[in-house]
Image: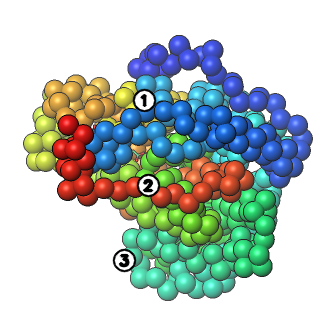
Amino acid sequence: MLYRSAISRQACFANRAFSAQRFASTKSLRDTLKEIIPAKQEQLKKLKAEHGDTVVGEVKVENIIGGMRGLKAMLWEASVLDPVEGIRFHGLSIPDCQKVLPAAPGGKEIIPESMLWLLLTGQVPSAEQTLALSQELAAKGALPKFVEDLVDSFPRTLHPMTQLGMGVAALNHDSAFQAAYERGMKKPEYWVHTLEDCIDLIARLPALAARIYRNVYAPGTPLAPVDGSLDLVGNYANMLGYGENHSLTEYLRLYIALHGDHEGGNASAHAAHLVGSTLADPYLSYSAALFALAGPLHGLANQEVLRWQMAMQAELGADITEEKIEAYLWKTLKSGQVVPGYGHGVLRNPDPRFIALQEFCDGKPELKASPIIQLVNQTFKVAPGVLKAHGKTKNPYPNVDATSGCVLYHYGLTEFKYYTVIFGVSRALGALTQLVWARALGLPLERPKSMSMDALSKFIADSK
Ligand code: CMX
């Protein structure tokens, strides 16, 4: 609870919680979607017809030259990010989700299958529906032989994210959407085949990601096959070789569920949306997202955080005080580097995902006692003050990456170059959900208008 007070404004939003439907029927995922899609299509039609020319905001020169920051220009259904209170998935905050979404059998943390169901439908699934989805994913989880061979042919030195993106792109060999498109399917069928591809891809990601891990970090060792009795993350942990570690498996469930979506404007989600808008299939669209995620300002930050915290630990020695951390933070900033794990393009408060992961740590004595996690906590006490004094970042608070890798490290998953791959397994939940909705709603090709500096200067001169 130590961290939750840091976002006390969240309490003001309590009344808005649970806008998602709390109790779904026992219908299948496909039947649930079939039932809700017509109403959403109608909503969009009405918005277009009745409010198509309503002005939402203005476009300033600073938006055009500033990475379109803050510009409301995309439709994204599954989640909305408030700068102060953080992410809500169909209206549910992270603490709401922790209360209502089913866990894995024998576990306590949100199981990603239940988050996927929520993201896709806006409804909270029952334990039975979640289990049925787990079983479907496990049944579809094995990789085609040619993809195994492709991944096995990569040099060990190729970054795991490059391998993941290439593996995902190659899976489009079996794309149901692409095959149906070539047969001349009609528009109302688009979402059905998109959904099939999305479920198949989510199902196969653990086997692909685990194979990359085995090849890069433990070549020649056995790789467990997908086990039909396990959930998505149970299988992933098992294939990574950590199936016996219940705490790590639970952590991965929580991390993958919470990281599943962060509205649409972040680089990976937006890349999937942009590429998907060309009617490229979900495999090609999501491989684009993975290459965006591989950038150090985005998903690669979790590997950078650990590298930075460990360098700090090595330099400061055993007796680490807040004064020493403060001096180290200034040294980082004065050398022109960013403090990894701090700042955000939208958030202006500590990231609730960071808080949820810290609370997970608080509940485990071994994590509370872990020197690297203690260092994360100490840094959290000092860094916001230093970043405020530095005066550049609009958000001096931690984002989710400030802690995510340190827990993996504690449990023995010490290969930090691999951490973004786990993020990549997770982000599929939200980015692929939106592809289903984009096809169900018939969203068009994305095509913003660009301007040159000369054209901008002329526009400014002419408008004086
Ligand atoms: N340390 C030092 N300087 C920082 C900073 C940090 N953690 N965060 C932002 N700044 C600086 C920016 O580099 C920028 O400086 P310039 O004006 O010299 O270019 C200035 O503050 C203003 O930036 P901003 O508007 O606050 O932040 P942006 O939206 O441009 O960037 C982000 C957001 C995340 C890329 C940035 O905060 C950052 O680089 N953080 C560290 C890397 C990190 O943790 N990334 C993970 C993001 C989480 C995610 O992808 O989900």
Question: Which is in the foreground here, disc 3 or disc 1?
Answer: 1
* Residue bearing the label numbered 1: 83
* Residue bearing the label numbered 3: 157
Q: Which mark is residue 175?
A: none
* Residue bearing the label numbered 2: 448
Question: Which is in the foreground here, disc 2 or disc 3?
Answer: 2
As drawn, 411 above or below 43? below
**CA gap, disc 2 and disc 3:** 38 Å
Q: Is mark 3 within 8 Å of ligand 1?
A: no
Residue 50, percent from left and from top: 65, 34
Q: Mark 1 or mark 2: which comes first in sequence?
A: 1
Label 3: state its secondary structure: loop
Residue 167 seen anywhere in this rendered image of the structure: yes
Residue 204 found in image quarter:
bottom right
Residue 299, percent from left and from top: 41, 53
Q: Amino acid at mark 2?
A: Pro
Residue 355 appears left or right of 101: left
**CA gap, disc 1 and disc 2:** 25 Å
Q: Mark 2 or mark 3: which comes first in sequence?
A: 3
